[in-house]
Image: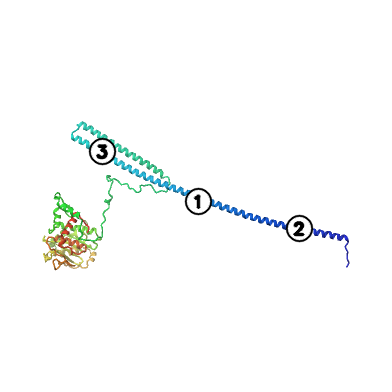
Amino acid sequence: MEKRLYSGDVFEQIDETTDDFFEGFTDGKEMIAIQETVGDDEKMNDGKKDDVMEDNEKVEDEQKEDGEKVDDDEKMEKDKRKDGEKDDEKVDDDEKVKDERKDNDEKVDDDEKVEDEGKDNDAKVEDVKMDVEAKVEDGEKLDGVAKVDDVEVDLKLKDLKVKVKDEKTVVDVKAQTNDDNDDNDDFQLYNTPPKGNYGRRVRKPKKDDSYTNPSLSKMPKTKDPMKVNHLQKFEDELLDKVKAWLDDPKTDNSTTDLHTVQAKKEVLVRVVTRLTWIEDTEIDAFCHLLRKRISCYPKTYKNTHAAIGDCVLSDRIRRQHRTFIKDPSKYPVDEFKDYYMGAPHRYMPEWSTIDDVYMPVNINQKHWILCVARLQKYRIDVYDCDAYLYKNLDPYLKPFCDMIPFIFAKTITPGERVRYPNFNFEGPLQPMTYKRFPHPKVKTAAAKVGEVPRATESGDCGVFTLMYMEHLTANQPVHNVTSENMGFFRQKMAVRLFHQIMEP
């Protein structure tokens, strides 16, 4: 290979290039160092900037929170102001309601004042008239003077009427103005109840033609059911009124209404007086009152399905029996239509709805007994206070035993016959049997079940008959119906009839 040698120029050039290289290299290092320092500075500046930004954001957040707190405080204040305004409005509304009530009270007071003044004016006019009439009667003035006084009286009357009219017109004008104000107030909205008179009711005066007593429109309620006590005494004032009416000579020609008869004094005298014969008038009056009592107290007498007859029914059966026995199949039962068909005005039910028929029976105008036709048992029970007076009752009870089943069978419908299984409606009817309840073996002994107390004195058989009827319809025994209690029963019966008392 061929070797080439470089000359000195070449070495010089190499030295220059190397020098330039090293200078550039050092300059590059310096530039890198500078850039690194600059980058570090920028990083430091960026970190500071970030810290500053975070601080600023915290400050802004704190300012926002403070602003929100301020807003909340302002809202609370506004709410408080609104509540205060509402309270003020409520207070104003309450004051307005109070003012309106005061106005209404003042209106009522004004009306009352006007009415009082009108009454005073009427009284003054009557006094003036009385004075004028007295003067004319005494002859203190002549006819001409009397005429002048009449003219003066007429003028006074006119003046008083004009004054009353003026006062009424003033009150009416005030009322109209208040009504107008009320109409204007209707357009305003308030949180208050509607207007009206609260707590005070304005009633019409009793002298007004349009006035009606509210208590008269309400009938008293009866206490039904109630416990029946026939030994309970009425108030003494009621008996005193009966005795006062009987003892007063001014009422000798007067009568009292017993519904069945206009009774004179002698009727109640027979009722009150011991050992006195009771006639048909008193018997029928008491039977009507008992029928009315049973009708008005259905719950108290819920187990009583009875028709209470009167003396007319007993007398009619005995009179018609002679015609009946001639040909029973052709006998017209219409004679008893007013009994078996019922009579609401006399509180008599239809016989198709009952089980018993009570009949007071008079024997020869000397003795009273009670006959009870038991339709379910096909028997007549006899209650006699003195069974030894008439030992044989066949001739007196035969009309009842023959005719009552016949009348009942002819008037009842086929659908209603189911209630009475002991009746032989299809075959020939047999007369009813009767049973007279006995007395205790010892005259003074108390009656047991199935026995009737015996009267120790004569004259009270009519009261015994009515008391039997009253006790039996209330489903009570008759052992208290004794001669010792006849005085009490007579007084109680007189009070019932005179005052028309229905309570059991």
State the separation of the CA atoms marked 1 and 2.
Answer: 69 Å
- Tell me the mark number nearer the camera, choosing from 3 and 2: 2
Where is mark 3, residue-wise? 124
> Residue 455 versus residue 65: which sits nearer the camera?
65
Q: Disc 2 marks which residue?
A: 30
**Which residue, given by chain and number where applicable, does mark 1 sit on?**
76
Sooner in the amino-acid sequence: mark 3 or mark 1: 1
Measuring from the top left, give residue 421's x and y in whole percent.
22, 68
Measured Cα–Cα span from mark 3 to mark 2: 138 Å
Q: Amino acid at mark 2?
A: Glu
Q: Is residue 427 above or below residue 139?
A: below
Camera-nearest residue between 212 and 7: 7
In the picture, measured across the screen, residue 46 lies left or right of residue 384, that is right
CA–CA distance in space, label 3 to label 1: 71 Å
Where does the C terminus fall, quadrant-wise? bottom left
Q: Residue 139: x percent and y percent?
A: 18, 33
